[in-house]
């Protein structure tokens, strides 16, 4: 499974904007864990580039846009690259259900947000199991355990992003 990735510089101002918005929205839903807040804000920055949102590719180089396709590709490929693929499924699920849940109804088959939540939780839990013990494994366990809260926080963040003031800021820094 091939991956493509584009990076935004560490000192880019949009990182501060997303970190601040994520911090506020997570606080409102009771997520106070700094690791989770940092992870989610970094995820938002990463997915500013659409190539990163759809970075998983099949053997022919076609981008994988649906979780079911990502899961089938993992089955075909075996354990090689499973951690990154599962991480991406968790990230993708969190992002889509948190910020663009209406997009699930416009796909070739309408899917319930619950399906994406379940897949995201499971993906992060599998990543934690692959990692074993340590800080990274602990982070992914927390992301799995608090997945619905993180989705709720992103739902709130979406409302902030619709605010004309924040839209202005994003245009200045994006």
Image: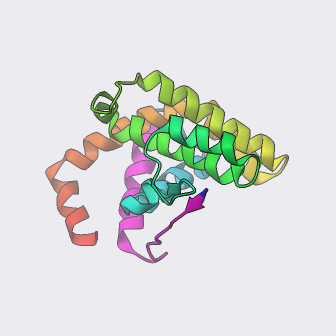
x, y (%) of residue 172? 22, 70
Q: Is residue 111 above or below residue 99?
A: above
x, y (%) of residue 29? 46, 32
Q: Relative to the observer, which residue lies in front, 144 or 71? A: 71
Tell me, yes or no, if residue 19 can be seen here. no
Query: Which quarter of the image is occupied by the N terminus?
Result: bottom right
Q: Is residue 50 left or right of residue 68?
A: left
Q: Residue at x 43, y 72 (%)?
A: 8
Count numbered badges in the picture: 0
x, y (%) of residue 138? 74, 45
Q: Relative to the observer, which residue lies in front, 57 or 27? A: 57
- Display coloring: rainbow
**Which residues are the magenta region?**
2-27
Query: Which quarter of the image is occupied by the C terminus?
Result: bottom left
The answer to if 28 sits in the magenta stretch is: no
Tell me, yes or no, if residue 84 can be seen here. yes
Q: Quadrant of residue 109?
A: top left
Q: Is residue 34 above or below residue 147?
A: below
The answer to if 16 sits in the magenta stretch is: yes
Q: Is residue 109 above or below residue 161?
A: above
Q: Residue at x 67, y 43 (%)?
A: 76
x, y (%) of residue 96? 40, 40
Q: Is residue 128 left or right of residue 161?
A: right
Q: Residue at x 60, y 38 (%)?
A: 72
- Specify the farthest residue to the front: 60
Q: Quadrant of residue 31?
A: top right
Q: Is residue 104 left or right of residue 81?
A: left
- Specify the farthest residue to the right: 133
């Amino acid at each position: 499974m091939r991956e493509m990735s584009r990076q935004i510089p560490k000192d880019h101002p949009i990182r501060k904007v997303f970190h601040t918005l994520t911090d506020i929205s997570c606080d409102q839903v009771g997520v106070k864990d700094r690791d989770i807040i940092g992870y989610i804000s970094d995820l938002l920055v990463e997915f500013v580039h659409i190539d990163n949102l759809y970075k998983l590719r099949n053997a022919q180089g076609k981008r994988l846009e649906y979780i079911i396709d990502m899961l089938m590709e993992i089955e075909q490929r075996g354990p090689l690259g499973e951690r990154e693929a599962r991480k991406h499924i968790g990230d993708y699920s969190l992002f889509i259900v948190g910020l663009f849940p209406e997009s699930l109804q416009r796909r070739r088959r309408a899917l319930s947000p619950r399906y994406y939540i379940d897949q995201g939780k499971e993906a992060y839990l599998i990543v934690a199991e692959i990692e074993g013990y340590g800080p990274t494994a602990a982070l992914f366990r927390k992301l799995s355990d608090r997945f619905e809260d993180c989705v709720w926080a992103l739902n709130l963040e979406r409302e902030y992003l619709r605010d004309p003031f924040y839209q202005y800021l994003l245009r200045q820094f994006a």
